[in-house]
Image (tube, rainbow, N blue to C red):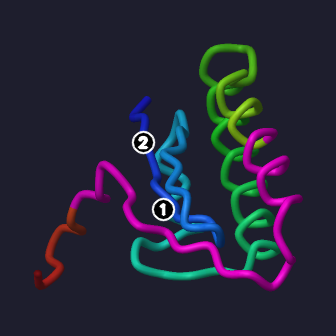
């Protein structure tokens, strides 16, 4: 199962590299986009829950690293106003190109 990292800049300008055991984060966040803290937290909760569920389906148990990452993001987010911006700086690795798509 492919893993990925996503890098974000919080409203206080701290940069955090985050982990997901699945590329599913690409379905919920986009590099170069900004989200309110509230929306970012909701999107991460959905993405990391899906990622943990994919691990559970494959290996019979959820991913404790995804759960821990979500908990860390939730705690950090609580320190900011819900409308403050979180910037997604990078999603690594990028998704592979869709066959037949024009670059």
Q: Which residues are magenta?
A: 71-96
Say if the magenta span includes residue 77: yes
Disc 2 versus disc 1: distance between alpha carbons? 9 Å
> In the image, residue 42 lies at what x, y percent?
80, 66
Q: At 75% across and 40% down in the image, what residue appears?
A: 72
In the picture of the structure, the residue carrying the numbered disc 1 is 26
Q: Pick whichever, 100 or 76, lies toward us.
A: 76
**The C terminus - image quarter:** bottom left
Instruction: Tell me where residue 12 sits by quadrant.
Output: bottom right
Q: Pick whichever, 94 or 90, lies toward us.
A: 90
Q: How many marks?
A: 2
Say if the magenta span includes residue 84: yes
> In the image, residue 23 lies at what x, y percent?
46, 48
Q: At 55% across and 58% down in the image, what residue appears?
A: 14
- Could you tell me if the residues under marks 2 and 1 are in contact, i.e. CB atoms within 8 Å? yes
Q: At 67% across and 33% down in the image, what residue appears?
A: 66
Q: At 63% across and 41% down in the image, what residue appears?
A: 51
Q: In the image, which disc is placed on residue 4?
A: 2
Crowding near the residue tagged with mark 2, few <14, some 14–19, many ≥20 C-alpha atoms within 10 Å: some
């Amino acid at each position: 199962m492919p893993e990925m990292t996503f890098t974000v800049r919080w409203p206080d300008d701290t940069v955090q590299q985050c982990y997901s055991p699945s590329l599913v984060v690409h379905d919920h966040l986009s590099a170069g986009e900004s989200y309110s803290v509230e929306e970012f937290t909701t999107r991460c909760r959905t993405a990391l829950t899906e990622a943990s569920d994919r691990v559970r389906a494959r290996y019979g148990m959820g991913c404790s690293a995804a759960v821990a990452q979500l908990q860390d993001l939730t705690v950090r987010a609580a320190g900011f106003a819900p409308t403050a911006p979180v910037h997604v700086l990078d999603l690594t690795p990028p998704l592979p190109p869709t066959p037949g798509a024009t670059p």
